Structure formats: structure tokens, C-alpha cells
Amino acid sequence: LGRQHEKLNDPNTALERYLSALQILKKEKASADYHVVILLLHAIGKMYQHEEVNLLDMSLKCFVQEIGVIRSKLDEEDCSTWKLLADAHFKAGMLYKIMKDTEEAIEHLSKALDYTKRYS
């Protein structure tokens, strides 16, 4: 449902739906599919960035949490994991840039570039 509201350019409702789905998965930790958790964190981070929502701190928190879940739950030697890490580090790096935290921006954007080189 979140994706449908996102396509309808309704970021607030999309955000609500994504957050509800994440809550459900967190309750069912033992059977959680971590790829779905990662995709939800990414989608939530994007919605927090949307100009109608504009909660950049929350968006950054989602992308940093996404990086943590990827590193702890997925195989870091897998090419698909590199792509997820590249995208999450890129999003975090761009947010740090917007927030004028140059050191963190450079760190995350450098990691994004490293992971992109691995899977390209």
C-alpha cells in the first residue's frame, strides 16, 4: 500500500503504510525477511526526504539503520549486498551534505563509490 500512495504522490500516507509494515515485521522478528526490512527502511527514508514531509534527521536515521541491518544480516561478499550498501551510503552521504556535515558526507559517499566499483 505504501508504494501505491507513493505513486499517487501522497507521501504522508505512504509513510504511514511503510511504518505500519515495519512495525509488523519488528513484532515477528524471528520470521522477518531482512531484505524486506531493508527495503522498508529505504522507502521510509525516501518518504521522510519528500518535500511535503521534509524530516531529514529521520530520513538519515533510516538510511544509517538500513546500513546496519545490511551489514549485520546479509552476506557482505554478495554482489547484491554491495548494491544495497552503495545506495544506502549514497543516500546518507547526500543527506549529510545537505546538513553541512562534510566529513560524514565524504565518508559515506566514498563508501558508496567503493561499493559501486565492486558491483560495476
Image: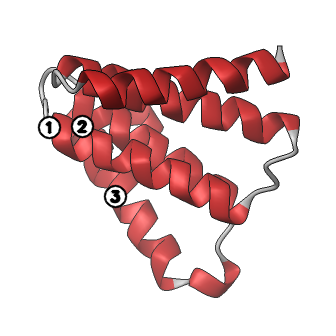
The quadrant holding residue 44 is top left
The quadrant holding residue 19 is bottom left
Q: How is the image coloured?
A: secondary structure
Q: Is residue 9 visible?
A: no
Q: Which residue is mark 3?
A: 19
Quadrant where the image shows the C terminus:
top right
Query: On the rendered structure, is 79 left or right of 21?
Result: right
Find the distance from the CA under tag 1 to the CA under tag 3: 14 Å
* 1 or 3: tag closer to the N-terminus: 3
Find the distance from the CA under tag 1 to the CA under tag 2: 5 Å
The amino acid marked with disc number 2 is: Tyr
The amino acid marked with disc number 3 is: Leu
The x, y position of residue 35, in whole percent, is 68, 54
Give the residue drawn at x 58%, y 28%. Answer: 111
Element on which disc 1 rests:
loop
Query: On the rendered structure, is 65 left or right of 83?
Result: left
Element on which disc 2 rests:
helix
Element on which disc 3 rests:
helix
Query: What numbered label is drawn on residue 55?
Result: 1
Q: Is residue 104 visible?
A: yes
The correct choice, above or below, for 46 with respect to 70 in the image is above
The x, y position of residue 10, in whole percent, is 24, 29
Of the residues tagged 1 and 3, which is closer to the observer?
1
Of the residues tagged 2 and 3, which is closer to the observer?
2
* 1 or 2: tag closer to the N-terminus: 2
Number of other residues with Cα within 10 Å of mark 1, as a class: few under 14, some 14 to 19, many 20 or more: some
CB within 8 Å, label 1 to label 2? yes
* 2 or 3: tag closer to the N-terminus: 3
Find the distance from the CA under tag 2 to the CA under tag 3: 11 Å
Query: What numbered label is drawn on residue 48?
Result: 2
Number of other residues with Cα within 10 Å of mark 3, as a class: few under 14, some 14 to 19, many 20 or more: some
